[in-house]
Image (cartoon, rainbow, N blue to C red):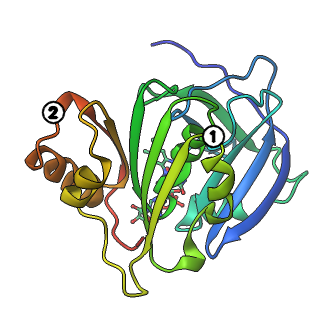
Amino acid sequence: MPVHPEYRPKLLSSREVVPGVRLFRFEAWPGFTFLPGQFLMFHFADDPKTWRAYSVCSDTADSSSFEVAIGMVGAFSDRLGALKPGEEKELIVRGPFGKWTWSGEGHAVLIAGGTGVTPFRAMALLGKGKKTIFYSSKNKADRLFGDEHAAWAMRGATVHARATREGESRWTAAEIVSATDDSSAVFFICGPKALVEDMKSGLAAAGVDAEKIRTEKWGDYTDLF
Ligand SMILES: Cc1cc2nc3c(=O)[nH]c(=O)nc-3n(C[C@H](O)[C@H](O)[C@H](O)COP(=O)(O)OP(=O)(O)OC[C@H]3O[C@@H](n4cnc5c(N)ncnc54)[C@H](O)[C@@H]3O)c2cc1C
């Protein structure tokens, strides 16, 4: 088994960005680099058996710090959310890990709900490639990184956002394929199991080749969007 180095990065800031979701910025360790879509594993030194994965959501061009955006949904995320800069001494991070990545080749269609948009922020911030994002949240006020969509557009990303509790329906795979209208596009789906599985089968039914569908399942939960 390869041994992955452990780091104790300094917490630079933590703030609530939409209700129930906090954005954390950490000082990166020397040589830090990641590919959009990769995640880090976090645990506390006094609880070494409890690890959680968080996708790096910052700009790959920044090697001095990195960001993760985390929903406050359970014991581990709540403990992280309570940390203030200077209180992170017990926090240990390893990584980055993961082969579910996109580095700006061709056209990526990025499909997410709620916090599942975090890895897509790193992709949206890339200065290359065409990005089309289909995003659902419960309300407009829950739109994670909603205030950045204009800046993402300057880097080649188009965002189609819907608020499912404000009279808009969730995106369907058939709608996404029709709106994309690009047989060369590669589809990335991120979030809870039900969203990922429904979208995957829907894209296949709409004629998208299996090798053009890339999925990242976070867990079995539904209360997101
Ligand atoms: C590769 C990967 C990357 C991930 N990246 C992120 C990320 O960038 N941001 C993030 O918030 N989470 C992310 N997650 C989920 C994260 O690892 C934890 O599962 C989550 O923080 C819950 O841990 P907890 O101990 O706080 O709550 P738990 O007690 O473990 O879970 C409480 C409940 O919340 C559900 N849940 C898990 N994640 C979420 C979520 N995001 N929103 C709503 N409910 C959820 C669980 O399934 C469970 O039902 C990622 C998971 C994977 C596998």
The label number, if any, that marks residue 155 in the structure image: 1
Q: Please report the residue visible at 26 percent of the width from the left and 45 percent of the height from the top.
A: 181
On screen, 60 above or below 2?
A: below
Image side of residue 189 versus residue 144, left or right: left
Of circles 1 and 2, which is in front?
1
Q: Residues within 10 Å of mark 2 (few under 14, many from 20)?
A: few
Q: Quadrant of residue 124?
A: top right
Residue 50 seen = no
Q: Quadrant of residue 61?
A: top right
Of the residues under marks 1 and 2, which one precedes in the sequence?
1
The label number, if any, that marks residue 209 in the structure image: 2
- The single residue placed furthest to the right in the displayed view is 86
* Secondary structure at numbered mark 1: loop
* Secondary structure at numbered mark 2: loop
In percent of width and height, residue 164 lies at 38, 79
In percent of width and height, residue 220 lies at 31, 59
Q: Please report the residue visible at 78 percent of the width from the left and 34 percent of the height from the top.
A: 8
- The single residue placed furthest to the top in the displayed view is 2
Q: Which quadrant would the N terminus be assigned to in this image?
A: top left
Q: Please report the residue visible at 50 percent of the width from the left and 12 percent of the height from the top.
A: 2
